[in-house]
Amino acid sequence: MSSNPTPGLARFNAASDRAARAALHEACASEAWGNHLLAHRPYATTEALYAASDAAMAELTAADLAEAMAGHPPIGRPTPGDATSSREQRGMSDADADLKAEMLELNLAYQEKFGHVFLICATGLTGEQLRDAARNRVDNTPEQEREIVRTELGKINRIRLGRLVEDAADPADAAEGATP
């Protein structure tokens, strides 16, 4: 692997703290996670960025995880106008009405039990796979679920970071309209 960063990673490394923070917030709503990644810039490789993300995920407190989860819409109900959540939840877009209704019920049961949205790295999963995961996880203990959520957030963050540093757009442009 080359020691020179990709053009997208070089732009992220060179972006102002404000622009980089806004771009990171689009990837993950946890302030602690974003601060960790900002503090370790510049990154020589995308893998180094991923390693920093993984390290930050491992250190997140329950409150930090809750903050991160607050940035995610329920499965089956992507945020209107949000291309990222629509793309990530594509597996539910073609689901029939019965599956969508079942997913809504599972989301509500999960949220009632755990106090937050059912969070899963939905990229590439079908509606049936998402439903089955929700069915299986609703019986977990809060402690088990917290660690599963940590892992799932880590996967989501890696995908989103990959898009950020591979994207030809400037991080300041990518974060335009985001709250700093």
Image (spheres, rainbow, N blue to C red):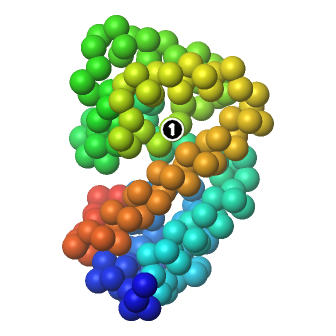
Residue at x-position 45% and y-position 28%: 130
The percent position of residue 108, horizontal first and vertical second, equals 53, 17
The percent position of residue 58, horizontal first and vertical second, equals 69, 59
Residue highlighted by disc 1: 120
| 17 horizontally vs 91: left or right | right
**Which residue is situated farthest in the top direction here?**
98
Image height check: is 114 above or below 158? above
Residue at x-position 38% and y-position 65%: 162
| 127 horizontally vs 53: left or right | left
Q: Nearer the viewer, residue 95 or 65?
A: 95
Q: Amino acid at mark 1?
A: Ile
Q: Does any portion of residue 55 appear in the rendered image?
A: yes
The percent position of residue 124, horizontal first and vertical second, equals 36, 41
Image quadrant assignment for residue 179:
bottom left
Screen quadrant of the C terminus? bottom left
Image height check: is 75 above or below 64? above
